[in-house]
Image: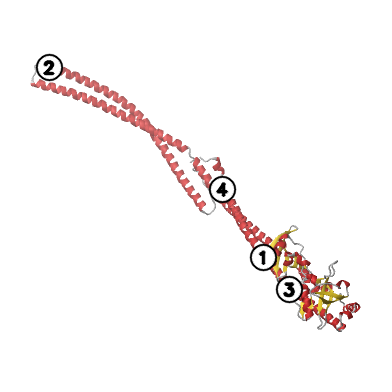
C-alpha cells in the first residue's frame, strides 16, 4: 500500500529538489572557487598596476632628483665663485684688517644671505667675522668631531672628509641645505659654502637662504613630479620619498648635519602604526613591501619601494578604484554563469515536465487497468521511448481485453451447457431412480416366486425316496437358488451404481454451473 508520504514525494518533486540542491551546490562551489581565484587575480592585477605606477614614479623621481641635483650643483658652483670673489676682494688681508662693513657690502652686491669668516681657535673652529652677529662666536666643536674634522681639512689644504651629500674639492666644501646652528630661537635653513684660500688663516663661508634654492629645484624636482603624477593619475592618493632611518631613530631629524627628514618629498598623511613598523624594518633590511589598509573607511593600497639605502618611495593607491573594474568584470562573469545555469535548469525542468506528463498519462492508464478498465488507452505524442512504451501497453491492454472478452463468451457458453446438463442429469436421476425401484421390486418378486417354486420342488423331492438323481436335482436347485439371488443382487447393484453415476454427473454439472457463474462474476468486474 502506498502511504500519503510516498504519494506526496512524487518524481517531479524529487527531481526539482535534487536539481535545485545540485544547482545550489554547484553555484556555491563554483562561486567560492571563482571568488578565491578572482581575489587572487585582483591582488596580482592591483600589484601589477601598482608596480607600473611605482616604476613610473620611481623613474620620474630619479630623473627629477637628478635634475634638481644638477640645478643645486650649479648653485654650489655659484657659491664657490662667490667665495672666491670674496677672497679676491679681501686681497689676502688678515682677520684684523677686515671690517664687517666690507662683508655686508659684498653680501648685498652678491645677493647672499650672509658671509662668515671662520678661524681656528685651539681644537675648535669658530665664527670670527660675520654679517650676522649671531654667527660670531659660533663653535663647530659643540657638534662633535664630524663637524670640526672637515674644517681642519680645509685649513690644511686637503679635500674635506664629510658625509651627507656635500660637494667637496681641495680647499672647497659646499653643504646641502642645512639648519643653522646659530639661530636657536627660530629654526632657519641655509645653503653653506666653505672656501679656504691657500695661505690664508681663515675660511670664507658665504651662504644663501634655502628658499633661493627651492625656487629653482621645486620647478623640476621630485615635488613637481609628484604633483604632476597625482594630477594625471586619479588612482594615486599619496606619493612621498621617506627616510626609513629617521623613522627608526627620530633623533636623526634633530641633528644639524647631515640634514635628515622623515619625509623628504611629497606628503605622508595616511601614516599608520603599521607604516612606521614597516619603515623601521626597511631601515635594516630594504625590500619591496605592499599591503592594503583602511583609511577613513576606504581601502588604500600602500607600496614601499627602496630606491637607495637612505630613501624609500611610498605610494598610496586607491584600492577600490583599481579593483572595482576587475570586480565588476568578475561579477558579470559570475552573474552570466548563474544565468546560464538557471537557463539550463529551466530547460531541463521543462524537458522533464514533458516527460513527467507522459509518465502521468501512462500511470493513469495503468491505474485504469488496475481498476479493471481494459477499454482505456494512453496517448503519448512524443517520438521517444515513452511513446513506444505507451504503444506497447496499449497493445497489451488490447490483447488482455480480447482474452477476457473471449473468456467471458466461453464462460457464458459453459454456464449455458452446465445448466442444460444439470437439468438433463436431474431428469435422468429421477428416471433412473424410478427404474431402479421398479427393477429392484420386479427382481425381488421374481426371486421370491422362483424361490417359492424351488422350495416346492425341493420339498417334493425330499418327500420321495432319496436317489442319486434326486440328490443331483437338489444340488442343482440349491445352485439355481444361489444364482437367482446373485442375479437379483447384481441387478440391484447395477441399478444403484447407475443411479449414483447420474447423481454424480448432476453434482458435477451443478459445480460447473457454479464455476461458470463465479467466473462471469469476476469478469463483470472488468470493463470490456
Q: Is residue 326 left or right of residue 353?
A: right
Kindly report the distance in space between the C-alpha atoms of the residues bearing marks 4 and 2: 111 Å
Of labels 3 and 2, earlier in sequence is: 3
> Where does label 3 land, which residue?
62
Which residue is the extreme one toward the top? 463
Q: Which residue is mark 2?
A: 462
Judge the density around disc 3: few (<14), some (14-19), many (≥20) Cα neighbours within 10 Å: some
Q: Earlier in the sequence, mark 4 or mark 2?
A: 4
Q: Position of residue 254 (x, y in %)?
A: 78, 66
Which label number is shown at residue 309?
Answer: none
User: Residue at label 1?
Assistant: 45
Q: Nearer the viewer, mark 2 or mark 1?
A: 1
Residue extending furthest toward the right? 101
Number of numbered discs overlaid on the protein picture = 4
The picture places residue 492, in percent across and down from the top left corner, at: 26, 25
Name the disc covering residue 14, or none.
4
Q: CA distance from mark 3 to mark 2?
A: 177 Å
Amino acid at each position: 500500500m502506498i502511504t500519503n508520504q510516498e504519494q506526496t514525494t512524487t518524481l517531479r518533486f524529487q527531481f526539482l529538489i535534487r536539481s535545485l540542491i545540485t544547482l545550489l551546490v554547484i553555484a556555491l562551489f563554483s562561486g567560492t572557487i571563482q571568488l578565491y581565484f578572482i581575489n587572487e587575480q585582483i591582488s596580482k592585477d592591483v600589484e601589477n598596476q601598482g608596480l607600473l605606477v611605482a616604476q613610473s614614479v620611481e623613474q620620474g623621481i630619479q630623473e627629477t632628483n637628478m635634475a634638481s641635483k644638477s640645478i643645486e650643483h650649479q648653485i654650489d658652483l655659484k657659491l664657490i665663485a662667490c667665495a672666491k670673489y670674496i677672497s679676491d676682494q679681501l686681497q689676502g688681508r688678515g682677520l684684523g684688517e677686515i671690517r664687517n662693513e666690507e662683508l655686508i657690502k659684498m653680501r648685498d652686491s652678491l645677493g647672499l644671505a650672509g658671509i662668515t669668516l671662520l678661524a681656528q681657535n685651539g681644537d675648535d673652529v669658530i665664527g670670527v667675522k660675520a654679517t650676522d652677529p649671531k654667527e660670531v662666536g659660533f663653535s663647530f666643536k659643540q657638534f662633535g668631531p664630524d663637524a670640526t674634522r672637515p674644517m681642519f681639512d680645509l685649513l690644511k689644504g686637503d679635500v674635506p672628509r664629510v658625509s651627507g651629500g656635500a660637494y667637496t674639492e681641495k680647499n672647497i666644501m659646499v653643504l646641502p641645505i642645512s639648519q643653522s646652528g646659530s639661530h636657536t630661537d627660530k629654526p632657519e635653513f641655509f645653503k653653506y659654502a666653505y672656501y679656504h684660500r691657500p695661505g690664508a688663516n681663515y675660511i670664507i663661508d658665504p651662504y644663501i637662504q634655502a628658499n633661493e634654492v627651492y625656487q629653482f629645484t621645486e620647478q623640476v624636482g621630485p615635488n613637481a613630479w609628484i604633483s604632476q603624477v597625482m594630477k594625471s593619475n586619479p588612482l594615486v592618493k599619496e606619493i612621498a620619498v621617506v627616510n626609513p632611518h629617521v623613522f627608526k631613530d627620530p633623533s636623526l631629524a634633530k641633528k644639524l648635519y647631515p640634514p635628515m627628514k622623515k619625509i623628504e618629498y611629497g606628503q605622508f598623511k595616511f601614516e599608520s602604526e603599521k607604516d612606521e613598523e614597516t619603515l623601521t624594518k626597511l631601515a635594516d633590511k630594504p625590500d619591496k613591501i605592499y599591503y592594503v589598509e583602511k583609511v577613513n573607511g576606504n581601502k588604500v593600497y600602500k607600496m614601499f619601494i627602496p630606491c637607495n639605502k637612505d630613501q624609500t618611495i611610498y605610494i598610496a593607491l586607491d584600492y577600490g578604484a583599481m579593483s572595482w573594474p576587475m570586480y565588476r568584470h568578475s561579477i558579470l562573469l559570475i552573474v552570466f554563469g548563474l544565468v546560464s545555469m538557471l537557463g539550463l535548469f529551466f530547460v531541463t525542468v521543462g524537458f522533464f515536465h514533458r516527460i513527467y506528463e507522459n509518465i502521468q498519462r501512462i500511470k493513469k492508464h495503468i491505474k485504469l487497468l488496475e481498476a479493471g478498465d481494459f477499454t482505456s488507452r494512453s496517448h503519448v505524442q512524443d517520438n521517444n521511448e515513452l511513446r513506444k512504451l505507451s504503444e506497447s501497453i496499449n497493445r497489451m491492454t488490447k490483447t488482455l481485453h480480447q482474452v477476457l472478452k473471449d473468456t467471458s463468451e466461453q464462460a457464458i457458453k459453459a454456464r449455458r451447457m452446465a445448466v442444460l446438463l444439470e437439468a438433463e442429469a436431474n431428469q435422468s436421476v429421477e428416471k433412473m431412480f424410478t427404474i431402479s425401484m421398479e427393477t429392484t421390486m420386479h427382481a425381488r418378486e421374481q426371486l421370491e416366486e422362483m424361490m417359492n417354486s424351488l422350495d416346492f420342488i425341493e420339498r417334493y423331492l425330499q418327500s420321495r425316496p432319496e436317489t442319486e438323481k434326486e440328490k443331483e436335482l437338489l444340488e442343482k436347485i440349491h445352485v439355481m437358488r444361489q444364482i437367482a439371488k446373485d442375479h437379483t443382487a447384481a441387478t440391484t447393484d447395477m441399478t444403484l451404481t447407475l443411479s449414483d453415476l447420474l447423481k454424480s454427473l448432476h453434482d458435477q454439472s451443478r459445480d460447473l454451473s457454479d464455476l461458470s457463474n463465479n467466473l462471469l462474476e469476476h469478469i463483470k468486474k472488468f470493463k470490456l
